[in-house]
Image (cartoon, helix red, strand yellow):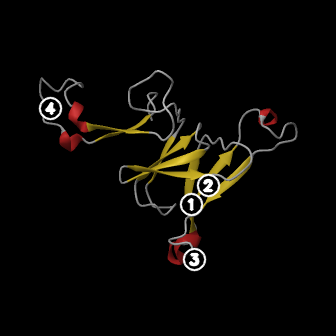
Amino acid sequence: SLASGHLASFDRSKCKVLNGPTATGNHCPEGWTLYPFPGPQFKNVSDAGSAESSYYVWVDQHNALGLGKDVPIATGNLNSALLALVHGKFVVLRVPYVNDYFTKGMDGRIDDPNVGWKGRALWTTYATRAMFHLETGKGTFPKVVRFQLRPNPLAN
């Protein structure tokens, strides 16, 4: 996740120079791909990107969520969502709460891989250091949020 509002990917196989005296660290711009986060860009900024300031990126190595193996998922602080990069496009996983969804981390869990989507989930926290600063005020407690994706809307 970059401060420019992008998720970056680097593919070493695209590099023309892999080693030797010209492999200085700046020798492979063709290996980089930048994916702009969803959302608006800052006012008067014409460069690609977004005002999104993702805090954390986690890679779903085992397809715990159901979007595929090795899918990077970023915390979307300004989107109130998780931002999963699937085949070069972002899938926005928004939490339908009244309050903003502000997570700082996540982890996948596969309880039973043999039962399909019901045995898999992505778990996140909904917490800040000062929960009482949220819209609900004093007495607001942190929450745990579970994401599960059905293969189709009628799957049971």
Task: Give the label, 3 or 4, closer to the camera.
Answer: 3
**Residue 140 shown left or right of residue 143 in the figure:** right
Q: Which residue is mark 2?
A: 123
In the picture provided, is 6 more to the left or to the right than 15? Answer: right
Q: Residues within 10 Å of mark 4 (few under 14, many from 20)?
A: few
**Residue 49 position by quadrant:** top left
Residue at figure coordinates x 47%, y 33% from the top left: 50
The image quadrant of residue 15 is: top left
Amino acid identity at mark 1: Arg
Question: Disc 4 residue type?
Answer: Asn
Q: Earlier in the sequence, mark 1 or mark 4?
A: 4
- Mark 1 → mark 4, Cα distance in angstroms: 39 Å
Which dot, 2 or 1, sits closer to the camera? Answer: 2
Q: Give residue 109's mark.
A: 1
Residue marked by disc 4: 19
- Give the Cα distance between marks 2 and 3: 23 Å
Q: Which residue is mark 3?
A: 154
